[in-house]
Amino acid sequence: MLDLRRLRNEPDVVREALERRGGAEGLSRVIELDEQRRALLPQLEALRAEQNAANEAISAAKASGQSADEQIAAMKQVAAQAKELEAELSAAEAELEAALALLPNLPDDDAPAEDSVLRECGEPTKFDFEPRDHLDLAGERIDMERGARLSGARFAYLRGELVMLELALVRWTLELLGEHGFEPVIPPVLVREEALQGTGFLPDTEQQIYQLADDDLYLVGTSEVALASLHADEILEAEKLPLRYAGFSPCFRREAGSAGRDTRGIFRVHQFDKVEMFSFVAPEDAKEEHLRLLAIEEQILTTLGLPYRVLDIAVDDLGASAARKFDCEAWLPSEGRYRELTSTSNTSDFQARRLAIRMRREGGKPELLATLNGTAVAVGRTIIALLENGQQADRSVVIPQCLVDCGAAPVIPAAGA
């Protein structure tokens, strides 16, 4: 959520920043409602002052034995006006809050106008045979047919060696993140609406979210939602920052609007597992922390031996809460192109303001902090990249040693072998 004071004091700056994202629709209405609310406040305060004066006059009249009928009539009239004004103010505040929630975060000045490739790391994997895709390599270990019979399209059973590969991948990632100061967390995956509102997923991406029919609960599309709310309505001591968490959870997305896209395999499914990084930092440290999260994502990809490239994401594709975002895309030999594997966003104080998360420096007043998130490992997509880049001519797959050390098989046999 944006700072109303900045909207009042720098409307042109805010408008220009929002127009960089693709439009400032709704800003004028927010400013109008804020002016309306601020105009009503002194009127209401004046009426309450009249009420207090009328109460004192009634008390004085009764104390002196005089009739207070005139003062009581005056008080009733003022009370009726105040009640009417309170209702008008309440309606304006509710409309203002709803309109303000629709405005996205202001982009960082360095966010580019178009996606920009910052670097490519590692040579795209080449073979002296025709590379196979992950489904051909996995066989029934990625069982799409039975998954579809059970749950519908874009669900799968993960079986056999790939289960151990996932567990090894998650274990190795959490241990690596622990070395970087991240506390491992397994968060709830069912959350209330306030958590999604607080992180900016509502009202921006409601079409992608699963909602329970009989409860006011939603399935998360990322553990970012639960991790952000870990300190909702809290004041954190500045000397304890940064606080860093690594959340592992299943994630659920409806993938509405993606009909016909990536329907083969597990690249784009409704349920997947993910390890997510989340940081709470002082505002002045946010940009440095963002680069830190990106560096960890790159370390993971490098250690796994996956060729990748880093993109600085275009300002009009940031998502509601992000001020700047970097993506890492891994090379997929079967497609002959890079595909998104991880993403990291600096959300500045946007989520903290919505979730009322503040910090207090020594001797100071509470102030908003900054939050950041980053994908450490999107398990399904990483398994795709490991299978395709590690494939051999006999259709077996060689697994990186770091995962073997955590319990994965050193070689996944060819499907059907």
Image: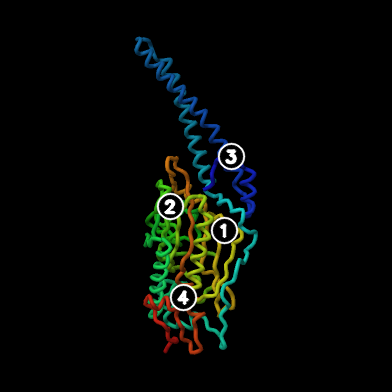
Direction from residue 239 to residue 267 in the image, left or right? right
Point out the tag, 1 or 2, that comes first from the N-terminus. Answer: 2
- How packed mark 1 is, by other alpha carbons closer than 10 Å (few <14, some 14-19, many 20 or more), is many
Residue at 40% in and 56% down: 191
Name the spot of residue 387 as percent of width and height, x first. Answer: 48, 79
- How packed mark 4 is, by other alpha carbons closer than 10 Å (few <14, some 14-19, many 20 or more), is some
Q: Nearer the viewer, residue 46 or 124?
A: 124
Type of the residue with mark 1: Leu
Type of the residue with mark 3: Arg
Label drawn at residue 8? 3
Q: Secondary structure at mark 3?
A: helix
Residue pointed to by mark 2: 241
Identify whether 327 is placed above or below 166.
above
Point out the tag, 1 or 4, that comes first from the N-terminus. Answer: 1
Label drawn at residue 383? 4
Mark pair 3, 2: CA separation: 31 Å
Residue pointed to by mark 1: 318
Q: How is the image coloured?
A: rainbow
Type of the residue with mark 2: Leu
Type of the residue with mark 4: Ile
Mark pair 1, 4: CA separation: 26 Å
Point out the tag, 3 or 2, that comes first from the N-terminus. Answer: 3
Q: Does residue 260 appear in this view?
A: no
Q: Select label 1 or label 2 by which is in front.
A: 2
Identify whether 62 is placed above or below 5.
above
Name the spot of residue 371 as percent of width and height, x first. Answer: 48, 54
Name the spot of residue 356 as percent of width and height, x first. Answer: 44, 46
Point out the tag, 3 or 4, that comes first from the N-terminus. Answer: 3
Point out the tag, 2 or 4, that comes first from the N-terminus. Answer: 2
